[in-house]
Amino acid sequence: MSEGELGQRWQQLIDGTTCPFCHPRPDSNEYWLLVQQLSAGTLYLDRNQTYRGKSLLIFDRRHVTGLEKLSTDEFLEFTSDLRVAAHAVASFCAPDLMNYASLGNVIPHLHWHIIPRYGNDPRWGKPIYTTSEGEVPETLLRAQEYEQLTDSLRNALP
Ligand SMILES: [Zn+2]
């Protein structure tokens, strides 16, 4: 892909034209499984479960690239969703620590990664993100295990 094509691709992601996080959004795909729609966002379980319970909270209302673009009401509702989701994840995973990341470097549509951390996880003491791909292998589960995890998360939500 040329630099111009990359620039155009990025521009279409930024302006929402080709944004995969905008509606209509599939309930499940190769990256996530639906847990539940909350107030301003929808919670998904990340298919990569290297960090057990790792989830994704995507802002639903419209295409925005970051918190700075939200109204006060949207911000309060979305961060309230984040707290509710984090509480649910922590309550059934019992992690040693919780990490929260909102980056948007790949998909610039506002979302949070909710990342339970464990003393024995492969990046304990460091951010989960690495500079070389494949440094921490993905952990994929069987369909039944995903179902159990999404059920547990749903049951832990208010
Ligand atoms: Zn979007």
Image (cartoon, rainbow, N blue to C red):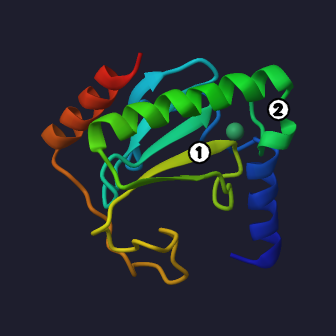
Q: List x then y, in percent, for residue 23.
A: 62, 28
Residue 142 as seen in the image, left or right of residue 72: left
At 42% from the left edge and 30% from the top edge, which residue is drawn? Answer: 27
Label 1 or label 2, whichever comes before in sequence order = 2
The residue tagged 2 is 70
Local SS, label 2: loop
Local SS, label 1: strand
The residue tagged 1 is 112
**Does the closest atom of ligand 1 sit within 8 Å of the Cβ of label 1?**
no
At 41% from the left edge and 49% from the top edge, which residue is drawn? Answer: 31
Find ligand 1 in the image and state its quadrant. top right
Which residue occupies the foreground of this view, 126 or 103?
A: 126
Q: Can residue 61 be seen in this view?
A: no
Q: List x then y, in percent, for residue 89.
A: 38, 38
Mark 1 is on which residue type?
Answer: Trp
Mark 2 is on which residue type?
Answer: Leu
75 up-or-down from 138: above or below: above
At 25% from the left edge and 27% from the top edge, which residue is drawn? Answer: 151
- Please give the count of numbered marks on the rendered protein: 2
Which residue occupies the foreground of this view, 140 or 118?
A: 118
- For the N terminus, the image quarter is bottom right
At 29% from the left edge and 21% from the top edge, which residue is drawn? Answer: 155
Q: List x then y, in percent, for residue 90.
A: 37, 40
- For the C terminus, the image quarter is top left
Q: Can residue 126 be seen in this view?
A: yes
